[in-house]
Image: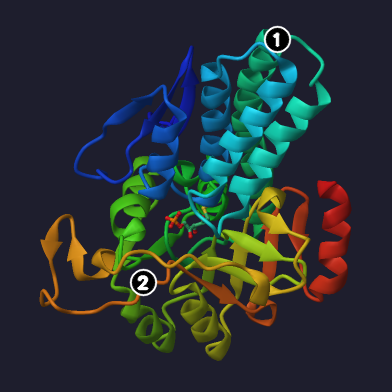
Amino acid sequence: MIPYCSICWDIDKVKLLDQRKLPREEIYLEITDYHDVIEAIRTLAIRGAPAIGVAAAMGAALGALALKTEDPKEFASQFTNLCREIAAARPTAVNLFWALDRMQALAQAHASEPVAKLKERLVAEAQVLLKEDEAINRRLAQAGQGLIHDGHRVLTHCNTGALATGAYGTALGVLRAAWEAGKRFSVWVDETRPLLQGARLTTWELGKIGIPYTLIPDGAAAALMQKGLVDLAIVGADRIAANGDTANKIGTYGVAVLAHFHGIPFYVAAPLSTFDFSIPDGGHIPVEERAGEEVTHFWGQAVAPADASALNLAFDVTPHDLISGIITEGGVAQPPYASSLKALRRVKS
Ligand code: MRU
C-alpha cells in the first residue's frame, strides 16, 4: 500500500496533496471553492495530466454545489460558465478538457431533473472518474510491464506516478507493476528542470515503492546513453495527437532524440483520455508557456541575475517516429500509428 493519494473527494470538499511542497512537507489542501481548484491546477499544487483531469471534474462538482439557482436552465448556463473558467487553468493536458466535457455531457443528459438531483449526480461522477482512472492505470501498467526486464536500467523524465494521476501512475505505474511482478531493475530519474518534478516527486514515489533509482541532471542522459547505461526510456504524456505525436514535459523530445540516436527503445505510457483524436498531429497541440520566474528562481530563491530574461515552455512535442510504442489501457500501440491508433480510437469511443 502506498500511504498517500494525490486527490480525493471528502464529503463536501476536495482534498489534495500539495505537490509544490514535496518532498519537504506532506500537506493536504482542503478545498471547498472551485476557484481554489483552478489555482491549485494553475500553480501545480496538483499536476500531471490524469490528476489534472480528476481535479477539474471535482472542481466542477464543487462549483455546481455552490450554485444558488433552482432553475434547471439557469443552472445549465451557470455550470457551463464555471466549466469554462476551469478549462482556462492550463492549456496542454487534454485530460482537463476531456473531464470537463464529461461533466457537461452528464449535466446535459439530465438537464430536466431537479437541480439538487443533478448536483448529486455531478459529485458522484467526479468520484467515478477518480476510481476509473486508477483502474485504467492498473490495466495500462499490466499492458506495459512485459517491456521491463530483470537488470534493465530505465530512464524516465518528469513525474508519472500516483501523484500525477488519480492513483497508481502511468509510466511509473508500468515500472511499479513490473516491480510487483518480481522483476528487479533500476531507474535513472531526470531531475526535470525547472520545477524538478523528477528530483522532488519521482524519487519520492520510487522510494516509497522500493524501486532503486539514481537522480541525474537532465543534461546527463546523453552521456549515460553513450556509455551504454540505459536500456529503455519511458515517459508519460499530456496530449497525444491522432498520428501519435506526443506532448510531454519539456526535455522529453531531447530524451527521445537521444534514445533514437543510441538505438534505445523509447516508450510513452498514457490513458486513452490523454489522446486528442480531433487533431491530426503535434503541430496543433497548444504548448503552455509559464512565467520566466520558474526558471530564474527556485523555491523563492533567485538562481540567476535579477535582470535575467528566461523562456519557460512547459512542454515539448515528440514526433511519433521517435516513439517505439504507446502503452495504453487498450494495449501497446506500435508503429505505424496511423492504423494502431485508429483501432484504439474505437476502444475510446
Ligand atoms: O507540468 P506538469 O508537472 O503537469 O507536467 C506533467 C507531465 O509532463 C507528465 O509527464 C504528464 O502529465 C504525464 S502524468 C501521468
Q: Amino acid at mark 1?
A: Lys
Q: Earlier in the sequence, mark 1 or mark 2?
A: 1
Query: What is the secondary structure assignment of the residue under circle 2?
Result: loop
Mark seen at residue 312: 2
Q: How many marks?
A: 2
* Residue drawn at (65%, 13%) of the image: 120
> How would you rate the neighbour count of disc 1 (Cα within 10 Å): few for under 14, some for 14-19, many for 20 or more?
few
* Residue drawn at (37%, 45%) of the image: 205
Q: Amino acid at mark 2?
A: Asn
Q: Please say if the residues under marks 1 and 2 sit with CB atoms less than 8 Å apart.
A: no
Q: Position of residue 332 (x, y in %)?
A: 74, 60
Q: Position of residue 296 (x, y in %)?
A: 20, 70
* Residue drawn at (50%, 52%) of the image: 172
Residue to which mark 1 is pinned: 117
Residue 325 in the figure: left or right of residue 205 = right
Q: Please name which of the two marks, 1 or 2, marks the residue nearer to the observer.
A: 1
Q: Nearer the viewer, residue 211 or 17?
A: 17
Residue 44 in the figure: left or right of residue 320 = left
Query: What is the secondary structure assignment of the residue under circle 1?
Result: helix
Residue 99 to residue 338: above or below: above
